[in-house]
Image: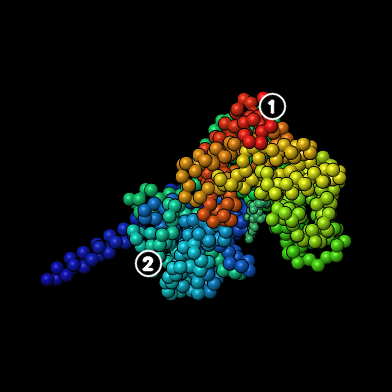
Amino acid sequence: MRKLKVSGYLLWIVVLLLTACAADSWSPVAGSTELLKDASWTCGSGNTTKDGALVIAAGNEFRAYVNIYGPRLITQGDFGVAVTLSAAQENLAAFSLVGRLGTSAWWDQGRKLDVGLEEGQIIVNYYNGASFMPNVTQTFAVDGLSGKVKLELRRVGAEFVVFANGKEIGRMAAVDAFPDGFAYFGASVRPNNALTLYDLTVTAPPENTAVAVDFSGGAAYTPTEPPLRTLADARHLLVGGAVEPQHILCDKTYAEVLGREFNILVTENAFKFWPIHPEPGRYDFTGSDTVVEYAEAHDMRIRGHTLVWHQSTPDWINNATFTQEQWNEVLQEHITTIVSRYKGRVDYWDVVNEAISESGSGGLRKTVWSTGVGADYVDKAFTWAHAADPEALLFYNDYGAEGLNPKSDQVYALVKDMVARGVPIHGVGLQMHVAPGTAPKPEDLLANIQRLGALGLQVHITELDVRLPSNVTESMLTLQANLYQELLEVCLSADNCTAFVMWGFTDRYSWIPGSASGYDHALIFDKAYRPKPAYFALRKALEMKQSLGPEDFGASCNCAP
Ligand code: G3I
């Protein structure tokens, strides 16, 4: 009887030991102990390091930080993420696994799982992209949480298992946070709190070898020959894309593709009033310098976008109550300061952007500039820019004025008048944000470019992108490729069309998903930097021995037999 009791105890001990061993058999995934050392965590993010730990602080607003430049977790099967962290516990501070990035706002259409501390408890929040509030919240009470806390979240089958300081503290149903099979790392921090991460590791059970850390961040770029810029140089054409300084600094593949493929770039936002001149008398050239220095180092020409626009102005301009004289001083000083700084370095300026009214019939749009400086603000802007750098070529840039239509007639009338009065203008930028079906007819585009040429003006295609539905198909990508090729062929066929510039170059960072709901895939490299059919279509157009002539573009052709 006594023997039986003893062997019963032994059996229990064996079972307990086996269970403990099974839990401990999860181990760090190869390379994942290096995760926090990746330079991406501090690149351009405002995060800092202290004694080897990473500090992710919020200012006076909620911080939803995602390390988009860093390694990604491949979320196959069962996996865990283990961190050691500390934060002020009355206020949320959590590490995040972001299965999908938000578009127009951090939460919009995103997927994010937060695991952290709040009010002395462990909290798990899941945001499904429908709201800035979590749609699943679960808290776990744990005694004596203070200082450094070790947290681990494991996905085991259909459950999330949460551990604190090495002990399981609860379970919940696993939510569908990783629909694309990967997760970015990040953090959510309430205002005035800071999260310190001491370590971060991905774990997996021995039988799951599929879970991994992808240190490339999802990039799959393989250079192909020849680069577009080599072909474009041979055709005396500038071909390029809009860029953001932070991507240049923090995304190695972005910087590699940009310099390899293009001979011109344009600043997507860095030269706009708001980032460059945020307060009266204070300029911030950090972003613009990064872009200009990059272009110079890669022998690329530069378009500066844009000196005068009614959008992206800071509040000190939006809410100003200046006299007309003061408005003139402010704008002249702004233009002179920026153009002088980059004299001889920025080749082309979009001096005035989108000044023609939306309706296409009402002449100049009413803006802070037209009311503040006066109706002659366009002339003045060009004159001031020319005075600051007489060698730079100065452009008027607009959208919806690419083909032949009332708006392009207005643009034509505006610049014709400027030319006639001797205002220093050298070119017109045709933005070209289109979709298959909304692009101008090639013969109209050509006719528009040629009538501007007859005024002695150059034309740049300045912001080309061809948006497609988010649920894209092969045939849509083919349509897109055909359109890219057709537009480039038109540009190549007109002597005064001297630059072909897209609004970005990779779908990874395009403005389209964030502003045109349901659309995406607008550029020539996909989100992993793989060249798309549109890329090869551009190559084909550039490789054609001879440019097409006006007769190749149909209706408006006035060609002699
Ligand atoms: O970087 C800031 C970030 O620090 C801040 O916290 C956040 C909060 O709003 O904003 C971020 O800035 C955003 C910026 O893009 C950089 O991502 C601005 O909000 C956002 O308004 C801005 O949008 C840009 C938009 O112009 C307005 O300036 C787009 O990226 C840019 O693609 C778009 O470009 C325009 C051309 O200049 C003119 N033609 C049309 C084209 C598309 O709208």
Which residue lies at the image location 44% right of the left edge and 59% below the top edge? 177
Q: Earlier in the sequence, mark 2 or mark 1?
A: 2
Q: Does residue 111 sit above or below 401 in this rendering?
A: below
45 vs 500, nearest the viewer: 500
Q: Amino acid at mark 2?
A: Met
The percent position of residue 101, horizontal first and vertical second, equals 52, 56
Q: Amino acid at mark 1?
A: Ala
Q: Rounded to the nearest whole Å, what is the CA distance between mark 2 and mark 1? A: 77 Å
296 vs 36, nearest the viewer: 296
Secondary structure at badge 2 equals strand
Secondary structure at badge 1 equals loop
Q: Residue furthest right?
A: 325
180 vs 204, nearest the viewer: 180
Could you tell whether 350 is left or right of 110 in the image?
right
Which label number is shown at residue 560?
A: 1
Q: Which quarter of the rendered image does ligand 1 occupy? A: bottom right
The percent position of residue 370, horizontal first and vertical second, equals 79, 58
Could you tell whether 121 is left or right of 253 in the image?
left
Would you say the residues marked 2 and 1 are in contact, meaning their CB atoms lie under 8 Å apart? no
Q: Residue furthest left?
A: 1
Q: Which residue is mark 2?
A: 172
